[in-house]
Amino acid sequence: MFAAEIISDAIPSLRADDTVQKALDRMNDFKLKHLPVVNEVTLLGLVAEDDLLNIDNHDTLLSDSAVNILNVFVLSNVHTYDVIRLLSQLKLTAVPVLDQQKNYLGLISINNMVNAVAEQYAVNEPGGIIVLEISNRDNSLAHIAQIVEADNAQVLSSYVNSFENSTRLEVTLKVNKTEITSLVASFERYDYLVKEVYNNTQIDDGSQERYDSFMNYLNV
């Protein structure tokens, strides 16, 4: 998935002749702390709520030298991972998207990003979740997929997490069925360490309730 696919059309940009107060009001309306300033198709930059609140006169225009403009954007063809990295590193709530000619295309808000990640990782699809711990020498997603498919299931999404100063990896799988007792047993037969299991309909351990609570949190 690329940045161009998750641009929001619902959030209008600001102009250089808008006031600080207008920018703050619009941020409040859309529950964001950052908004782009655009003249025609030219991005001037991103303004932040914290910076604007430090300006005493809220009638100040965004073109004024007192207004701090952040030179932050992504190109339309970057992967969503790069968008997430930028949002995380700079603590942004939104990031502007430009085309290859540096023309402004639109904005990706953090809510858009959460929805895109949920779609990319099949969060809303029913299925069981298995967390494996493996050695990085045994990191064969093909072999893991073969075990899943041999149990008449499919991998909907997967995620690999590494740990600093460790040769161990954590692989999180989401599969397209919730009765996964036999699949867990298959992994154990192949000497995989099964750390966690969620949404297994054969085990009532409260995991479904925790999962549903997490989904409700994402949808807030």
Image (cartoon, rainbow, N blue to C red):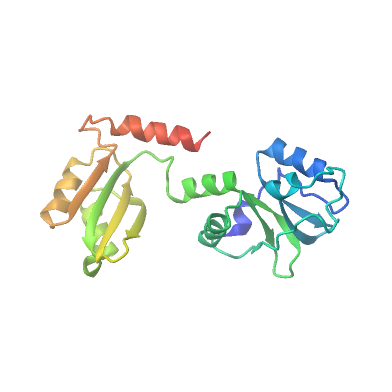
Q: Residue furthest left?
A: 189
Would residue 146 be visible to someone looking at this image? Answer: no
- Residue at point 30% right, 44% down? 129
The percent coordinates of residue 25 (x first, y second) are 76, 38
The percent coordinates of residue 187 (x first, y second) are 17, 53
Count the marks: how many? 0
Viewer-side residue, 109 vs 123: 109
Viewer-side residue, 209 vs 22: 22
Viewer-side residue, 146 vs 96: 96
Image position of 147 (left or right of 110): left
- Residue at point 17% right, 53% down? 193
Image position of 79 (left or right of 102): left
Quadrant of the rendered image containing residue 163: bottom left
- Residue at point 47% right, 45% down? 118
The percent coordinates of residue 73 (x first, y second) are 66, 62
Image position of 216 (left or right of 110): left
Would residue 36 be visible to someone looking at this image? Answer: yes
Viewer-side residue, 219 vs 148: 219
Quick check: 58 above or below 140?
A: above
The percent coordinates of residue 83 (x first, y second) are 56, 58
